[in-house]
Every structure is written in C-alpha cells, then in structure tokens.
Amino acid sequence: MATPSPGYSITVRMEVPSSARATGDVVAAVTGAGGSVTALDVAESLADRIVVDVTCDASDLDHADVITQALNRVEGATVRKVSDRTFLLHLGGKLEVVPKVPLKHRDDLSRAYTPGVARVCLAIAENPEDARRLTIKRNTVAVVTDGSAVLGLGNLGPAAALPVMEGKAALFKQFADVDAWPVCLDTQDTEKIIEIVKAIAPVYGGINLEDIAAPRCFEIEARLRAELDIPVFHDDQHGTAIVVLAALTNALRVVGKELSQVRIVVSGVGAAGHAIIELLHAQGATDIVACGRTGSVHRGQENLDPARQWIADHTNQDGFAGPLEQALAGADVFIGVSAPDLLTGEDIATMAGDAIVFALANPDPEVDPVAAGQHAAVVATGRSDYPNQINNVLAFPGFFRGMLDSGSHEITQEVMLAAASAIADAVSPSELNASYIVPSVFDPRVATAVADAVREAATPA
C-alpha cells in the first residue's frame, strides 16, 4: 500500500462511548487499517457518549473508504459524517482580490476612482511606460492554460484546470509576493491562444504558461516571446528544468561525479523532457539518451516534430536504438518525466555504481522510490512524502520576482542556469547529503536567492 498522504486527508465525525478506552480503540482502528491519525478532537460531550472528529491521512480514495469502514466497526461507535479535507480547502476557491489603498470616505474614492483616476489615465496615454509605475502591471503575472495537459491527468479542459491555476497563483503570492491570476482559456487552437494572450498582455508584467500540451506549447511560447515585451515562461518546461538541474548538481556532489562525465537517461520527451535536456546540454552534459513511448530518440528516425528532432540531433551520440530498460544499463543518472511504473528495482540495479534516480512522474513515479533506493545512491521524486522533492515551487516564484524587478523580458539560458545555481547553492555543504539535495520549498531564502540571481543575469530593459 502507498504511504498515507495529506492529499487524501479525511475528517470523520463519530459518536463513541464515553469510556476510557473508546478513543484508543478509534486510533487503533485507523492505524490498523493503514491510516495515519493527525488529530483527534472532542466536538461534543454527553452523559454517556462523546462526539469526536478523527482526522487522518489515507493513501487514496479507496483507502479512505477502508479506514471509514474500520471506524464503523469500533464497538459502540457510529460514524456521522466523513469530510474530504482537500475538497473543503477548495470550497469557494483559494484566491480573493484585496485593495491596497484605503476606501473609507469620499476623498479616498475621488482619488482611487473618478474623478481623480482620469488624470492617471491621461498620464499613461501620454507615456505608456508609466503603466508599470502607476498600475498593477509591474507586479502581476497571468497564469495561462488551455487545460490540455493538467498535471499528469491529461486533457481536462479549462474549468477543471482552474484549481491548479488558483494554486499556482497562491504560490506566487506566498513565496515571492507576486500578484498572479488564473487565465483558463476555452480554446486549444494555437493561433487563438496566441491572439488572446497578446490581447490581455497590457495588464500583466509577465506570462506564466501552464499545463499546455506538447508540441503546441513550444510554438505558443516561442511566438509570444517574440511578439511581447514582457517575460513569457512555460513553467512545465523551464521551471522543471531549472529545479532538475539544481537537484542534479547537488546529487552529483554527493556521489562525487561530474556532469560532463556521466551518462544520463531521460524518460519523457514532451515539454519537460525537452527543456531538461536543453538545459543539461547548456550546462555541459555530453552523454544523454532520451526515450519516449516507443524507445530511444536517435538520428535516422523519420517524421519527428521539431522538438524531438532537436533532441535527436543533440543527444544519443552512439545512436542507441532500443527500449528504456536497455538504455538504463550502465547509466549514471535516470531522470523520469513521463509515466508511472515504467521500471522496477531490478532495472535500477543495472545502472552504474552510485546511481542517481529522479522519478518525477506525479502522483505515481516511474519506479517505486523504495525499490529504487535499494540500488541507487540518491533518489528523488516529485512527491512531498519522500525525501528530495523536486518541486517547481523552488523556481518559478523567485524567477518571476527577479524578471519583474529587472524590467527585462528576455529569458535566456544564462538566466535559467543562474536560477538553478542559486537553488543548488541554497543547500550548504554541511547540510548536503543523499536525502537532502534540494532546499525546502518553505525556506524563505530560496525565492530571494533565485530572484537575486535572475535579476543579476537578466539583460536590463
């Protein structure tokens, strides 16, 4: 059974006898069913019974049902209600708009709105650059999606993508004080997306593209970068690549290997895989083999889209043609941004000594981290319930903070390499070990360090 996770946390309200052993029986029932009790609160006390709220983590929805059934079997107990804490957190959404200025009397209103605001409008009309100084523009990012590649769930559409975009916007604010807003588009037409984003761009200081499927995402980002004067950043590509490079830098320090000397196998040649390979290549990696659904990408394959053709031209110098499992034999590093359960512990055992495994498919990785850990020196996932969580939150808030502050709109490889270096260096030599290769997302120093590095590396406007 998978490890219980706060993502599947439930609160069960139930009546139990007011005996000394009742709450102990409740806790035993949860742990006996494989759950993890995180809180037990008395909600109401009666003469012979008490009402308790039992909060616990499950591993998935079916497991939550198993826990509930176990609680129903506690002697003398009655389950009243089961609440899914994740759904409760999302009720009414996760964002709100709060004014920054007082609006308490007529004088305030006369300055913030009509008639005073008309003077500000005229000033911007005369000098459009003043929009950055006199409006929300300089600190605001649009989180744009078409819902075509939501998390690892596929094409769910714009409405179903909204909870993710809300969460992204909340993270921007929490970690870098950037005001971000979800923009979920009801179209998956490349030209329409480009047209819409260009049309709304005057409001924003930056565009964060999110969960747009490959290969359309490549053209959308490239066109918008060429046609807009604000930074455009596809986080699924470049945010992932930045954090992967940071984590790999430190993992290689742990095992005492150099990036230019190791053999790297990447599973997944979509948006994230392509960007990871590009950034590793820019940093000096020379031996990379990329694998898609049908095996390795190599020269001589026909009908490759431009992104895969770039991979074919710049990797797999020996021309290996075969499946992922065979490519892994003798490799120093595995990076998975693809699909769950592609590999076994036995596959990891064929890798070189002191191997590094980044199994980043979410929520279920390419290989069981526990099985991988029996053979690899360093293991990382995208999950919060295992060590070494490789999470884009380490990159995108500080990255946009730095870009917005610099006034630059050109996102170069040098800027991304600087961000990756800042994240890696946030882990001091005294902290670095096989279970701690990236800093915590809650470390307040990280976003600041990334912002400073990006600000310095970015080309001034």
Image (cartoon, helix red, strand yellow):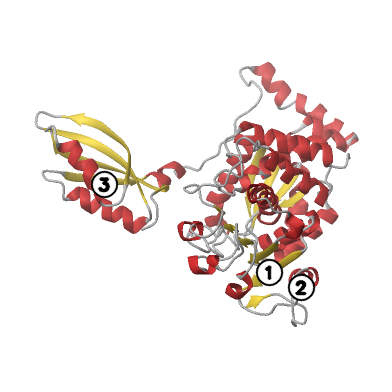
Pick out the residue farthest to the left.
48
Residue placed under numbered mark 3 in the picture:
30
Closest to the observer: 297 or 265?
A: 265
Q: CA distance from mark 2 to mark 3?
A: 51 Å
Picture disc at residue 416: none
Closest to the observer: 220 or 253?
A: 253
What residue do we see at 70% from left, 77% from top? 320
The amino acid sitting under disc 3 is Val
Q: Residues within 10 Å of mark 2 (few under 14, many from 20)?
A: many
**Residues at marks 2 and 3 touching, judged by CB atoms closer than 8 Å:** no
Closest to the observer: 269 or 43?
A: 269
The amino acid sitting under disc 2 is Ala
Residue 64 pos. (x, y %): 32, 53
**Please, is residue 202 above or below residue 197 in the view?**
above
**Please, is residue 453 above or below residue 99 in the view?**
below
Is residue 124 visible to the viewer in this orientation of the structure? Answer: yes
Q: CA distance from mark 1 to mark 2?
A: 8 Å
Residue placed under numbered mark 1 in the picture:
290
Q: Residues within 10 Å of mark 1 (few under 14, many from 20)?
A: many
Q: Residues within 10 Å of mark 3 (few under 14, many from 20)?
A: many
Give the side of residue 453 with respect to residue 106, left or right.
right
The quarter in which the C terminus is drawn is top right
Mark 3, secondary structure of its residue: helix
Give the side of residue 125 with respect to residue 66, left or right.
right
What residue do we see at 57% from left, 39% from top? 440
> Between disc 3 and disc 1, whose residue precedes?
3
The quarter holding residue 289 reads bottom right
Mark 2, secondary structure of its residue: helix
Residue placed under numbered mark 2 in the picture:
312
Residue 420 pos. (x, y %): 72, 46
What residue do we see at 77% from left, 78% from top? 299
> Between disc 1 and disc 2, whose residue precedes?
1
